[in-house]
Amino acid sequence: MTWANNKFFFIFTLQFVYIVGIPLTIILLITTFVKTSFCTTRHGLAFILLICNFISATQMTCLNIAMPAMVNHTASPNPPNNSTDSQDYSNVTLEEFQAVAPVYEWSAEIQGLILGSTNYVSFLIPIPIGYVTGVFGSKKVVGAGLLLSSVMTLFIPLAADTGATLLIVIRAIQGIAQTMIMTGQFSIWVKWAPPVERSQLTNIAMSGVSLGIFIVYTVGGFICETIGWPYVFYIFGAVGSVSCLLSFSLVYNNPMSHPFISTDEKTYITCALGQQNSSPNWSLPIMDMTKSLPLWAILVSYFCEYWSLYVMTLYTPTYLNSALQANLKNSGVLSALPAVFAFISTILEGLLADFLISRKIFKVITVRKLFTSIGVLISSSLLMSLHWVKSSPSTSVAILVVRASINNFSNSGSLVNFMDIAPRYTSFLKGLSEVFSSAAGIGSSITTGFILQKDSKLGWRNVFFLSAAIKVFGLIIYLIFGKAEVQDWAKEKTATTTEIENQAKELQVTRL
């Protein structure tokens, strides 16, 4: 079975998603959010952050779709497909690449180092960024991060011409900018998101990541084949440079500073958050955090979830291009299908989680663990099954689509749980979780490149099995130690009657 024979099937599927899937999602969102007005201010903020995450994701994913065009050997050493049509088309495509853009001699290991380079420095800075964001506010941090990421995207083609080393440096700086965007926005929700709406608001904003991946994969291959791979970076870098104004002009750190929010909504948010103190704290209970098993359960879950996420985000185009022998244009379009379904499912799953919590059908911790279990177990099973269906391209793509949709259940599970256990330290803990996700990005990209380089026959199988095993390990830890109650070290300390009396006695003695 060749890709040419399945061309019309996949084009029809993509058009169906465009024509039916996205409009239905928009209609559902409008129906859900409309109460007395078209949209609440907090949901409007969620859509603004969705756009920020969309732009951020397009810039981070550009290299994934451009990489097959930037090198002259992306396929693993497996024997090529015997189809004459596919081989001829690949040769013609390679000649077109060479005519419009430079091609580099990068091995699979070098490609892995480049793809994972966004995490090399960002591994060290999420904690200080989270702390600074919690003290000084999120608006400027998110806007500055988006602008820096956009500028670095514009410089990537020039850096690639200079060599892999400079490209890794540029990508590392871009990783710092991405950390600023991701860490900064979560402290916004501490002031804006009522507890029963945390899943839906954060998921709406985070769905922009999947939407950005979808757009890049849809048009990226076409851009590479027509005008050359450098224009992928020029286009999305320029769009981001202009769009960063959204963050500076429309994002506000809290409802009290927003000039257009209604009095009713401001009162509702204030009352909903009134029972928890989420103000920035100048001192952090580091020792108590270190000994907190619920916090460690979340951090381990972050590492394990993001290991698989980075593997699939970075290597899906390469997998389709090498293991399934798809040409670049097809691999881009097919890589986009899981992303668009993930975009839709992320929003719907967030709405479902908050529905279960707000109606008190399940406890908060039950929803978090249930959604995490669904996301991990089903997606891991589907991931491992890819090895046995690789002879059927349509089946492989269908599995990738379902896996991406189910995997996002974790966004309403363990990945948002730190807002439950310590709302006062959300920005700091988000920064801490970024350390673990960055570590997963470094380890997964380097390990995947090494496995594919050393094992030409079973490389992809080993990559998928390792990712699934790590995800299941993280789930086990979370199920055992995960909690959703505000931890003692995260509560506002109040002086007891005895403490007040002792202080009064000390003051009296001092005066005498």
Image (cartoon, helix red, strand yellow):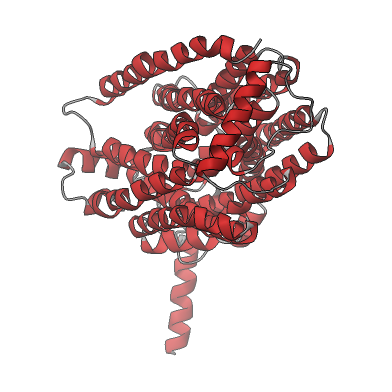
Disc count in the image?
A: 0
421 or 339: nearer the viewer: 339
Q: Is residue 240 left or right of residue 297?
A: left
**As displayed, is residue 73 above or below residue 88?**
below
Q: Position of residue 207 (x, y in %)?
A: 43, 33
272 or 133: nearer the viewer: 133
Q: Is residue 441 left or right of residue 218?
A: right
**As displayed, is residue 370 above or below residue 54?**
above
Give the position of the C terminus as an image quadrant: bottom left
Taking the image as drawn, is residue 404 in sight?
A: yes
Residue at 40 percent of width and 15 percent of height: 15
Residue at 64 percent of width and 60 percent of height: 165
Q: Position of residue 140 (x, y in %)?
A: 34, 59
Give the position of the N terminus as an image quadrant: top right
199 or 12: nearer the viewer: 12
Residue at 36 percent of width and 21 percent of height: 22
Q: Position of residue 268 (x, y in %)?
A: 25, 38
Taking the image as drawn, is residue 121 in sight?
A: no
342 or 411: nearer the viewer: 342
Examine the image and state in which quarter residue 455 appears: top right
Q: Position of residue 114 (x, y in %)?
A: 64, 50
Examine the image and state in which quarter residue 172 appears: bottom right
The residue lying furthest to the bottom in this view is 512
**As displayed, is residue 74 above or below residue 111?**
above
